[in-house]
Amino acid sequence: YTDIDAVGITDGIVEADKRREEKKLYSHQWVGRKTEREMQFPQEFSKCALATEVQKAQASVESDRIHILNAIVSSADLNAIVPDEHEKFDALNRLLRGRFAAGMYRMALASGAYVDLVSAALKDSGLGQLCLGFDGMKSLDLARVTQDLPPAVSDLDLSLADTSMTADSCEALS
């Protein structure tokens, strides 16, 4: 990524991940490209995202905030007083934190920064689909990765190019 490329944490692959400069990449390269992009996202913002509480969100128009939060909790009255706490807020917060954690996971493992916080958010997220890239990591602990996966994950896309992984070392995933 260059100074003019957009960076950010996304849920899944975006069009920018499918190209490098003007060259179209093969689908097996997209996860690695996604990881490259997400690693450029500022860590200080990422860490804040792990404390997301949607019920404390702001909006430019207060009635919009009330309507959105009431829609999240499936209130029959969108103008009702918004509850401070609700199980649907909790589930959405875990999901959002998990999505950010998935984008931060490679950087956290590589740097050692916030690794326990990121791992906990990922594991607790309830994510069923996950896309993680570890290209070039020579000391990847796949057993640790396996322990950090959300129990609900049923669709897992890993990119392990140029790592020390062998068929035997991947057995931890089974």
Image: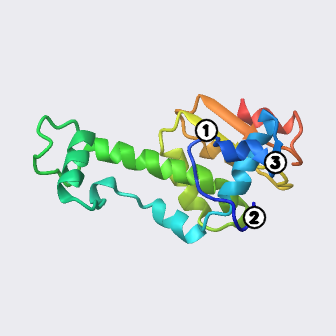
Find numbered disc 1 in the image and state the secondary structure of the residue it sits on: strand
Amino acid at dot 2: Thr
Point out the image quarter for the C terminus: top right
- 62 to the left or right of 135: left
**In front of the other: label 1 or label 3?**
3
Give the label on residue 22, or none: 3
Mark 2 nearby-residue class (10 Å; few <14, some 14–19, many ≥20):
few
Amino acid at dot 1: Leu
The quadrant in which residue 61 appears is: bottom left
- 26 to the left or right of 157: right
The residue labelled by disc 2 is 2
Residue 81 image offset from top left, x and y in percent: 11, 51
Residue 57 image offset from top left, x and y in percent: 31, 59
Instruction: Tell me which residue sits at (56%, 43%) in the image.
Output: 11
Residue 96 image offset from top left, x and y in percent: 45, 49
**In front of the other: label 2 or label 3?**
3
